[in-house]
Each structure stands twice: as structure tokens, then as C-alpha cells.
Amino acid sequence: MPAEKTFTRITDHYRRLILSGTLPAGSKLPSNKELAGTWGVAVETVRKALSQLQVEKLIRTSPRGTFVVDETPATASPADRLAAVRNTMRTSMDGETSIVTAAQLVVPPVYVADLFDLDHGDQIVRREYVAGRSSVRTLFAVDWFPAPFAVLVPDLLSTSASKNDGLTARVLEAAKRTISTARDDMHGRAADAREAAALGLAIGAPILAGATRWGDATGVIQYSEWCLPTRLTIGYEYGI
């Protein structure tokens, strides 16, 4: 097997173990020599794989060995993604990719219809996707948009991954709207079957679940429900 492919497999393997919590904070990894023997590669290939995990701040090295970091790895917050929409017209972070699993017009649950001030039976755009880095899934989300936006931006109903990033900015431009209000609600809970399958977790695994509303004086522009797997956290900066 080519060294480059094995290096990526080693990186992905340990990233997944760390982000899922299977390797908890402070866990010691086998030595480079032991890993080289396990994977059947040169020690230099192992060093390359682990150096990527160091760049991602998932592990630390010392004279005593290589350990999972004590700090929880951070991921993008809704505030980070809104800043990206404004600054770069994107919602994905560098190195992040997504797979869109659903994009359609549906009759929403009552609580979603109420958020958008819809009448009973009115339809709305529902987009479901999984995001991550390499083969590791770090976000499962469902985004809701008013149905008229699908006329302005038909790609809202496309499951093409290449069209997912930047949709919010395109909606704002086409609808001539500007996000001026934002709210996040978050809580920790156990993953249900759908969330567990999307994130590659066991049913009942702990997750951070959230709901985000972006809007303006006219109403809600985008409502998102999302969840993060174990060992990921988000943080905010705000003025006082």
C-alpha cells in the first residue's frame, strides 16, 4: 500500500477515535515504532500521520510519549459560520466538506411552521447534511428556508455537495435580505438513531445539540438544527 494512502488512513483512524471519545483526554498512544509495526509502514510515515493530528491540536508529544490533548478540540460555532457568510460568502470552514442527504420542499413540523409564521399545510425548504474533515463526521444539520427562496435560488433543492457551501450568501443576495438578528439555543443530550447514524456514533452517545435562527425585521431567513459528536466544543467571543 502506498505510504501516502497509509499515512492518511492512520490520521483518519486516530482522529476518529479521539473525536468520538473512544480515546479520552490524556490517553497515551503507542510508540511510533509500535504503530509502524501495527500498520506495516516506516516510522517516518507514522511521524507524518501524527504530525497532522498535532496541527489539528488533537495530540501532544513529550519525552514521555504521545498523548491525546487535555483540551477539547474546537469546531466552528454558528457565530463563526455567520461571520464566514459575511466575509467570504461561505458557511464551511477551511478543510471542511459536506454531504447533502436531503433537499426538498416539505410541510414542516408545527414548531418550524410557527417560527416562519406559515399557515397550516404551507411548504418550506428542508436541507439535511453531514459535514466533516476527511472521513470524520463532525456536524449533522438540518437547515430550513422559506419556500419562495427556492425560486430565487434553485440550488436549495439540489443535493449536490458542491452547491451546499455558500447557499446562505446566495439566498441573502437574491432575496435582498441582510441577517440582523441571530439566536442560538444549545443543550447536551443523547443522540437518537438518526443523529447517531449520521455522525457514526452509538445510539445514546452524548452530543451537543443546538438550534440557530438567523433573520431580520421581516422574519426568519434560516433556521438550523444541528448536533456535534463527543469531544467537540464551540466557543464565542462577544463585546461587553
Image: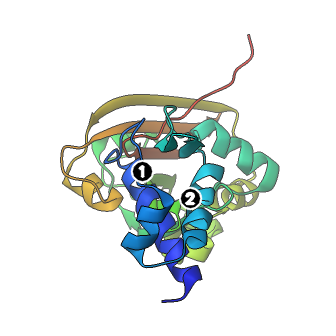
Residue 158 visible in the current orientation: no
- The residue to which callout 1 is attached is 29
**Vertical placement of residue 161 versus 107, above or below:** below
Q: Where's residue 43, x and y in %?
A: 55, 69
| Of residues 6 and 169, the one drawn nearer to the viewer in this rendering | 6
Query: Of label 1 and label 2, which has the lower sequence position?
Result: 1
Say which mark, if any, is on residue 127: none
Q: Amino acid at mark 2?
A: Leu
The scheme the figure's colours follow is: rainbow
Q: Residue furthest top?
A: 240
Mark 2 residue element: helix
Q: Is residue 2 above or below residue 207?
A: below
Name the quarter where the C terminus is drawn: top right
Residue shown at 43% from the left, 58% from the top: 14
Taking the image as shown, residue 33 lies to the left or right of residue 150, namely: left
Q: Is residue 84 above or below residue 160?
A: above
In three-dimensional space, the C-alpha distance between marks 1 and 2, rounded to whole angstroms, equals 10 Å
Please give the name of the residue rendered at 66% of the width and 58% of the height, measured from the top-left corner: 171
Q: Which residue is mark 2?
A: 50
Q: Secondary structure at mark 1?
A: loop
Query: In percent of the image, x 74 and y 16: which residue is there?
Result: 239
The answer to whether residue 240 shows anywhere in this view is yes
Q: Residue 193, position in %: x, y?
A: 19, 54
Give the percent coordinates (x, y) of residue 113. 37, 44
- Give coordinates of residue 151: x percent, y percent: 59, 69
Q: Are marks 1 and 2 in contact (CB under 8 Å)?
A: yes
